[in-house]
Amino acid sequence: MAHLLVFGPGYAASHIVIAAQEREFAVETIDRATFADEAHVTAAIGRATHILSSVPPDGDADPVLARHGPAIARSDARWIGYLSSSGVYGDTGGAWVDEAAPVGAGRRTARTAADLAWQALHPQVRVFRLPGIYGPGRSPFDRVRSGQAHRVDLPGQVFSRIHVDDIVGGVLASIERGPAGVFNLADDRPASQNAVIEAACALLGIAPPPLLPLDRAGLSPAARAFYAENRRVANGRAKRLLGWTPRHPDYRAGLRALMA
């Protein structure tokens, strides 16, 4: 039986776990409670036919690589995946980026280092670079309802995003038939954050939040950093090599699915 070991099952990885179990994978997870148990984790790595890490860097280091990287490097697993971020590309002024684009120029320097380290770890590694993730319980609807949605007056600012179901679909396609390498998983139509919030408000039948300049929007430092980068993420490689197509090709389709 295929045996999937998952480090740090956060939002996206938890959905992957459910889908893998539905496909009759035996699934084992390593969370904070078991992460430091060296013998337990080493044994779990030895049992795994498939390994996935969704753990982000902690400070300047990837904690999974720092503690368990050598054991994973020695693993006989036939598939190893790492959930990275399209933030490794930095700001492109709204230009498209694919997997051949340079990395490391943005604010995500620790993420870039982890991304590159995972690529070098093992010949079976697949790195999935993800843009903004949304889905049930983590969507524009939730931000609008909680009063945390913003519209910021930055003409020309665009972002890529992906519905969590399409992350699951891309990872499963990779497990079933995809080669090792780096893959962007993003929807087909990058758009401004304002357009997404306006569409969510229209579906909810409420007025959108006011359009404000960046310095008056009351954003946290993390949110301000989000607006410091502007790029479109291309997904053609994943379509060609994984045979994957997003079920939710743009934010409108994704929002309609969440409302259904």
Image (tube, rainbow, N blue to C red):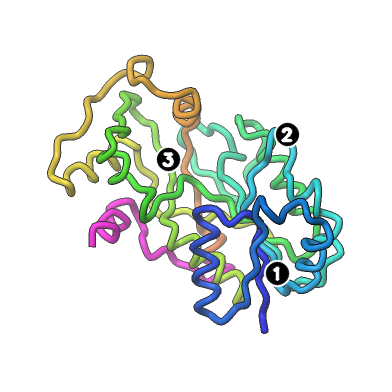
- Give amino acid for label 1: Trp
Q: Where is residue 236 in the image (x, y as percent from the top left)?
A: 51, 59
- Give amino acid for label 2: Asp
Q: Where is residue 150 in the image (x, y as percent from the top left)?
A: 31, 30
For the residues labelled 2 and 1, the Cα–Cα distance comes to 26 Å
- Give amino acid for label 3: Phe
- Quickly name the residue at label 1: 79
Q: Where is residue 11 in the image (x, y as percent from the top left)?
A: 50, 53
Instruction: Establish if 134 lies above or below 81.
Output: above
Which residue: 63% across, 44% down? 56
For the residues labelled 2 and 3, the Cα–Cα distance comes to 25 Å
Residue 52 forms part of the magenta stretch = no
Residue extending farthest to the bottom is: 1
Res 159 label? 3
SS under mark 1: strand
Q: Alpha-carbon neighbours of circle 3 within 10 Å: few (<14), some, or many (≥20)?
A: some
Q: Quadrant of residue 200?
A: top left
Question: Which badge, 2 or 3, comes first in the chain's sequence?
Answer: 2
SS under mark 2: loop
Question: Which badge, 2 or 1, comes first in the chain's sequence?
Answer: 2
Instruction: Establish if 91 lies above or below 80.
Output: above
SS under mark 3: loop
Question: Which badge, 3 or 1, comes first in the chain's sequence?
Answer: 1
Which residue: 24% across, 57% down? 259
Q: Is residue 144 left or right of residue 45?
A: left
Which residue: 23% across, 39% down? 198
Res 228 label? none
Answer whether labels 2 and 1 touch (C-beta < 8 Å): no
- Quickly name the residue at label 2: 60
Q: Give the range drawn in magenta.
A: 239-260
The residue nearer to you, when weighing 33 against 8, is 33
Q: Position of residue 93 (x, y in %)?
A: 48, 31
